[in-house]
Image (cartoon, grey):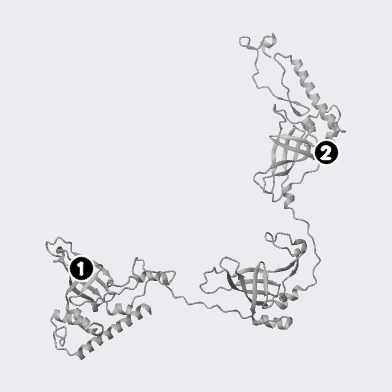
Amino acid sequence: MSINARHGLPFLPGNTFRDVTKSAYHRSQTLSYRNGFALPRPPTVGIGQDPLQSEELAYNYTNKLFSEAVALYPDPHATLLEFVPAHVALDKKVLRFHGYFQQRVLHSPDEAHRVRHVVVYYHLEDDSMCVMEPAVENSGLPQGKLIKRQRLPKNDRGDPYHWKDLNLATDLAVYGVVYRITNCDAFTREFLESEGILVNEPEPMPVDPYTSHRAQPQRSYVSPSDFDHQRQFLTLDRKVLRFFALWDNTDTLYKETRPVTIQYYLVDDTVEIREVHQANSGRDPFPVVMRRQRLPKTIREASEPFPRCVLEVSPQEVQEYYSPKDFQVGKTLSLLGRTLRLYDCDGFTKSYYESNHPEVEVKPVELPKKEEAAQEKEVPPYNGFGSLEDSLQNCLSLIPQPPKKDLLKMLENDHKVLRYIARLDSQNPHDEGRHFILSYYLASNMISIFEKPTRNSGIIAGKFLEKTRVPKPGFEVDKPQFYSPADFAIGATVVVFSHRFVLTDADHYVLKYLESVSDQIPNHTLDSLRNRLGVHPDQGTTGGNQPHEEQGRTQQAFKNNTLVAMNDYFHYYFG
């Protein structure tokens, strides 16, 4: 007790006097022990309170808790003089309430809200509460402890809930969630009634609409049929009736009739329809028109107005299914909206009807044959890109292949080139002194032109035309004819892509080669070369007197050696 408190002075700056006789500076205790129990020491009320008055308040506060605990839970073995604090007398005494709360569900067509069950525990020891949600199997929701054990505020001032505020058929608002209390256990009801609280009647727990929607309906049992399915399986397994029919599809855009096969499986009375694809029909390779299933023939009258285009017909709504008697050759059937005309069947189907259904007549129906006019393949016009052979490959196959080459001709004429000297036939006076070398490659029938350099001409010499096939003028683009050695006579004019060249000379090898194939070369071409090179027809190109027989033997030996070399080449590379 400070000095200013003794003299009744207010606790203000300037009125504080230090007690010089104080010798203990330890921190004051907040607990006091009575009969071995630690009890909280109540705070002093006001400033300058009398010590006797503080002790009296503490004594009355402790006696009040003690009297309440003894009155609530009297112990027959304990005397009234024995002191038991409230937290000991009310230890492990819990009130349990059952309830639920509704959780809204947004953006779901199946449910608008969910009903979630909870259990509210109220601990009498310290007036704390906790909210638990029992776990539901496969719920997909985080369940368990929703609110941990604590004192829950009941209003904006922060006043905690008391057990006097809890009752059945009431709402418990905690942190923005409203819990509806519907029931409690026997201990809770007995405790509330002992305190003079009238406990309301319990309410039924509402059912979650989504859970009830997912609940399986009660099974309905139908008396089994007397038909022996096992005998049908053992005797008719892998036995199929096959009919040939025409699908009348003339009411569509293209007005066509498609050939199909109808397969009737005797083991389970199911039907499958498959389409017969023809070569190059342009249709996708999916032959199944109707999957294997039982076809309803007659539906009960009560199920007629049902929208069958939306949902399948259940077995309870079908009065009769299609049987083998319904499939007769020559008749027209309507299966799931498709008009099918049966015109023939296979041998097993005919034998089956003869042995099991002799009254059904199985006679094939002749169909009128359509005479299809043979259409010739038309090659589209040449577009000008690449060579003519390369562009033609796009019309022959889906994946173009490189055009085939004459390997025998390439091997025989490899490195054989016919060279001519030509001048440019032009009206331009600057082109008079230009000289060109025209080379003809026998292996590929291509022509290349090289211009000889001329001093002080002012024209850049060199390659005038790279190796390419040169068509003759006056022919169509799609059907060209190319230059050959028979067209290259001395004095002849060769038109190369609108450029006119006049052949003026050739080397001796040209005459030697053309004489070896004289049956393919016209006489005026050979005569022009002999006259230009000064060779007499009776003389060889080398100027000697070699007889024609010896020359023929030499050419034949050359061909034989070439064929042997080609044979070795093919064996080496192609096995």
528 vs 148, left or right, is left
Mark nearer the viewer, 1 or 2: 1
Residue sitting at the far right: 76
Task: Identify whether 389 is placed above or below 304.
Answer: below
Task: Please tell me in which quadrant of the rendered image residue 72 appears.
Answer: top right
- Give the amino acid type for the residue marked by disc 2 in the picture: Phe
Task: Identify whether 107 is placed above or below 463.
Answer: above
Residue 6 appears in the picture as rendered? yes
Residue sitting at 71 percent across and 16 percent down? 46
Task: Report the quarter where the C terminus lies.
Answer: bottom left
Sequence-wise first label, 1 or 2 = 2
- Give the amino acid type for the residue marked by disc 1 in the picture: Phe
85 vs 474, left or right, is right
Counting from the top left corner in percent of width and height, residue 214 is at: 72, 52
Task: Identify whether 234 is placed above or below 134.
Answer: below
Secondary structure of the residue carrying numbered label 1: strand
Label 2 crowd bin: few (<14), some (14–19), many (20+), radius 10 Å: few
Counting from the top left corner in percent of width and height, residue 179 is at: 74, 38
Residue sitting at 65 percent across and 16 percent down? 23
Which residue is denoted by mark 2 in the rendering?
A: 187
Alpha carbon of mark 1 to alpha carbon of mark 2: how far? 118 Å
Counting from the top left corner in percent of width and height, residue 126 is at: 74, 32
Task: Please tell me in which quadrant of the rendered image residue 313 appears.
Answer: bottom right
Secondary structure of the residue carrying numbered label 2: helix
Residue sitting at 82 percent across and 30 percent down? 69
Residue sitting at the far left: 456
Which residue is denoted by mark 1 in the rendering?
A: 450
Kindly identify which numbered label has been placed on residue 64.
none
Decide which of 493, 545 is in the foreground and name it.
Answer: 493
